[in-house]
Amino acid sequence: MRADDILGAVGNTPLVGIQRLSPRPSVRLWAKLEGQNPTGSLKDRIAVAMIEEAERSGDLTPDRTILEPTSGNTGIALALVARRKGYRMLAVLPDNASEERVRLLELYGAEIVSSPADKGTNGAIEVARRLAEDPRYFMPFQYGNPANPRAHYEGTGAEIVRDLPEVTHLVAGLGTGGTLTGAGRRLKEHRPDVVVVAAEPELGDLVYGLRSLDEGFIPPILDESVLDRKLLVSAEDAVRATRELAQREGIFAGISSGAVLHTARRVAEGLDEGDVVCLLADGGWKYLSTRAWTGDLDRAADEVGQTLWW
């Protein structure tokens, strides 16, 4: 692969078999490794798409500062794009975000405004919306920006169709809804009987990277008609599966990836055959300060639930 600059290296991530983790030999599991993007997550795709669309429309000009509420990955991705393109970047971040995420935002030159930890990402959204009333700021707002699902329609979904035309199921985490909506639409155009499954956290259980729709905020870009099933997953299930990815397949992925794997295996148990794609949203590097891969499982799940990791 050759690219003119680092932004050209976004996308075209590997799709690899993880058959050791399938509960049925006739059901093939595949992992889409979004951690291979430049900042280590699938959010690089939407960051490039949202900023370049804003440049084309004239909504983002050199005198404006990019502003985004984030619990980590989207802010980091936007900070990379801002640094490469010469914009200032302000991230509104809950104050229980992990140290890794804060340091990466600083590394890429982003300024940080803190929001209350107990309000999570919804609190960050509230603070950012107030700041965005100042015309000096441009807020891409990943939760409502149509460039988000379009990036996954044109990129993630198209890559899966290209690399695995026989795909029967897509399993991804329910966060902004952009991945499920965009990639799901593309796969259903290719094959109408493709089943799109969302991994959703149990209400009150923190599986960061994922969002429970029962918490009261439904992202405007989420098209629930694309979803065929939603399955609940706990923090303990997510951590356990994250460990299995590393131990049995050598894949070092983030916590939400474990939630997706756990969900995909539940789907596979009910199939006679199929090809199930697991969208692994990020790599594990930003989670190293946890005990996610070592020690007591209950303690690890509890620790993950105390800090905002996504």
Image: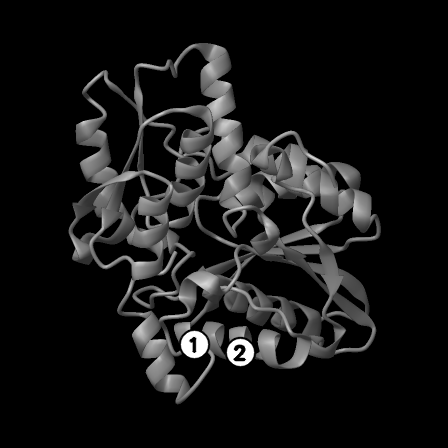
**Viewport quadrant of the N terminus:** top right
Residue at screen point 55% across, 38% down: 45
Say which quarter of the image contains residue 295.
bottom left
| Outermost residue toward the top in this view | 58
Tell me the CA gap for discs 1 and 2. 7 Å
**Viewport quadrant of the C terminus:** bottom left
Q: Is residue 6 visible?
A: yes
As rendered, which of 201 and 32 lies closer to the eye? 32
- Relative to 90, 234 lies left or right: right
Relative vertical location of residue 272 with respect to residue 84 in this rendering, above or below: below
Q: Which residue is mark 1?
A: 292
| Numbered badge on residue 243 | 2
Residue at screen point 42% across, 78% down: 236
Question: Is disc 2 surrounded by few (<14), some (14 to 19) or many (20+) residues within 10 Å?
Answer: many
Q: Amino acid at mark 2?
A: Arg
Q: Secondary structure at mark 1?
A: loop
- Sequence-wise, which precedes: disc 1 or disc 2? 2
Residue at screen point 18% across, 38% down: 127
Q: Amino acid at mark 1?
A: Ala
